[in-house]
Image (cartoon, helix red, strand yellow):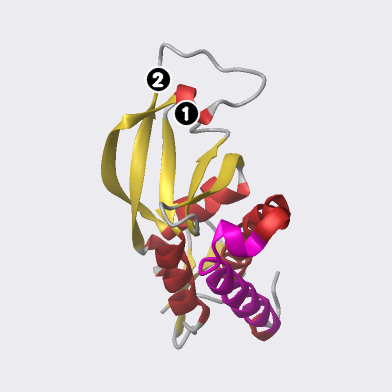
Amino acid sequence: MAYESHYWRQILKRDLTYLNKKITLTHKEVGDRIDEHFSYVEIKLMTTAYVIRKLADSGKLPDNTLNKAVSVICYNRNKSEPSRPFIDIEREYNFNSKSVTALPLRDICNQIIHSYILQVVGNNKRAFSEFWVTSDFNKEYYLYEISLKQYIKTLRQVANIQVTKLTTSFDEKKGKWIYRRS
């Protein structure tokens, strides 16, 4: 349980600031430390997803917060390509056939936390722009592409949301208290 959410939110905001700085860097500016920068961005994606889930699961966010829809690009898995011991993303997923869909923030956090693939990708200016993610559960079906800017913007909004109302009721059938946060 995250008893005091203030410190968790500080970590979240610090990591989002870090990510925001990194998306403005080009590969040329990073130089020969590109692998290090890619890895640190992926680590920050993991920690931010974990902090959001931890805050929500500890009751420190309103109940509907993780239902917030985020637009993502979805690539289907190439069924003709068997899984390999080493991932070949461009062979295993069909990048010629993409669709735009919306995933709840909880699903995005789960995809990241349980990721089979988590890879930051660059744009045509050779700057960090999106990330690919699929969980070990969804790897046989989809690969999601999520804008780093949109992810950061969404999590910044969530980082500032506070629970302002708590209602409780006792569920006789379940024999436990039900909490609703808004």
* Horizontal side, residue 74 vs residue 118: left or right: left
* Residue sitting nearer the eye, 78 or 3: 78
Residue 34 in magenta?
Answer: no
Q: Name the outermost residue toward the bottom.
A: 164
Contact between marks 2 and 1 (CB within 8 A): the answer is: no
Decide: few, some or many residues near mark 1? Use Cα within 10 Å; few <14, some 14-19, many ≥20.
few
For image coordinates 72% across by 54% down, the residue present is 32
Of 27 and 10, nearer the camera is 27
Q: Is residue 3 left or right of residue 63?
A: right
Could you tell which of marks 2 and 1 lies nearer the N-terminus? 2
The picture places residue 105, in percent across and down from the top left corner, at 43, 59
Q: Amino acid at mark 2?
A: Asn
Look at the image and say whether residue 27 sits in the magenta stretch: yes
Find residue 124 and report its horizontal and vertical position in percent.
Answer: 41, 52
Give above or below for 95 relative to 65. Answer: above
Q: Residue at x 60, y 26 (%)?
A: 87
Q: Which residue is mark 1?
A: 90
Q: Looking at the rendered structure, which numbered label has been put on residue 78? A: 2
Q: Amino acid at mark 1?
A: Glu
Q: Main secondary structure of the magenta part?
A: helix
Q: CA distance from mark 2 to mark 1?
A: 10 Å
Name the quarter where the N terminus is drawn.
bottom right
**Span colored in magenta:** 7-30
Give the class, few, some or many, for how many residues have Cα within 10 Å of label 2's Cα (few <14, many ≥20): some
Q: Is residue 164 visible?
A: yes
Q: Is residue 59 visible?
A: no
Residue 56 is left or right of residue 54, and the answer is left
